[in-house]
Image (cartoon, rainbow, N blue to C red):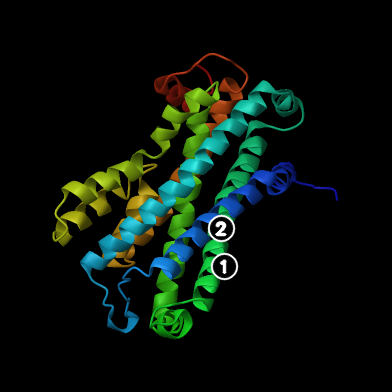
Amino acid sequence: MIMKSKYMAYAYLSTKTLLLNKSLLFGFLFNLIIALIVMAYLIIFQPEIPFLNFSAISYDFSNALGMLNVIVIGVVIFLFSSVAAIMQSVIDDRDSKVSEIINTSISEKHYLFGKLVTSFALIVVTILSTLTAIIIALIVFSIFNPYDFRIYSDIVKPFFTTINVDTMMFFIGCLGICMLMLITSILFALSISIKANTAIDAFPVSLLVLTPYFLVFGLLIFLPTNSTELWLTIAATISFVPVFSPLFILIYVLLNGFSILAYLAVILSIIYLILLFKGVANIYSYAFYVSEKLSLKQLLKLSVKSTI
């Protein structure tokens, strides 16, 4: 099949190579084994499990912060493993003949677009793989369930009965912000991954990508959890800061719902994303072909001028 667009051609080739990687299967098997071990522990030892009554759940500030904890922890777990893979792939490409192909056949923008699509696909596949492993383990648990409650009738069914149109639209909106957040984090990871020449260098560099999430952890620890106005002020302010924007838009929406401020912040965050893509392409037009280590200041200069 002939691909007319070089963007789609490289993205298709890169994603296909990823999906045929056996490490994804090993990752799924690892997640499944862990989930089955947890379920086996519950079935054999029968520890006390707090029953969650969905009909009694009310949406308030404390619940929003609890949801934020779960989302941030989940994103950090999936993003950290993916960032390591992203950086390793860039290092491998620099050491191989891919740099020659980029220099002759495709541009840095084509390469970055392919890596962006591949990295996003990696995160999505990892999440789906984990969810599939959990569902299989829950099915096994429901067959041998020694507790008084039932998975479907007492948990799954009541959960879906609480969902209405407004809840579904809110969920879709939050999912869109999460996608924007992941794409921004991936691009940021690609921009600074050029600093790493070896796998050993990749770890400290990858921590920079998680800086916005570490900041949220710090806020969750040190800020009072009963101060709604303080949280809203911080979230509304940082929602307009590049790179940090999508994460704090999500925080603002979880605390206050969708408003004009949230919509404006989303639009500005998309503009930041486009500018970030152009800046990273400028960085790769120079840094991808040199072996010298570059400082963050040099990368910032490259993102603007394409040269040091």
Residues at discs 1 and 2 in contact (Cβ within 8 Å): yes
Left or right relative to 180: residue 114: right
Q: Position of residue 235 (x, y in %)?
A: 26, 53
Q: Is residue 39 above or below residue 286?
A: below
Of 34 and 268, the residue lying toward us: 34
Please tell me which of labels 1 and 2 falls first in the chain. Answer: 2
Residue 73 is at least partly visible in this image: yes
Residue that carries the numbered disc 2 in the rendered image: 32
Q: What amino acid does circle 2 point to?
A: Leu
Q: Residue 122 vs residue 146: left or right?
A: right
Give the structural element (helix, strand or loop) at label 2: helix
Seen in the picture, residue 172 relative to 21 is either above or below; the reply is: below
Q: Is residue 178 left or right of residue 64?
A: right
Which residue is denoted by mark 1 in the rendering? Answer: 136
Q: Is residue 265 visible?
A: no
* Foreground residue among 287 and 222: 222
Q: Residues within 10 Å of mark 1 (few under 14, many from 20)?
A: some
Label 1 to label 2, Cα distance in Å?
8 Å
Percent coordinates x, y for residue 97 in the rendering: 74, 23
- Residue occupying image coordinates x 28% and y 78%: 57
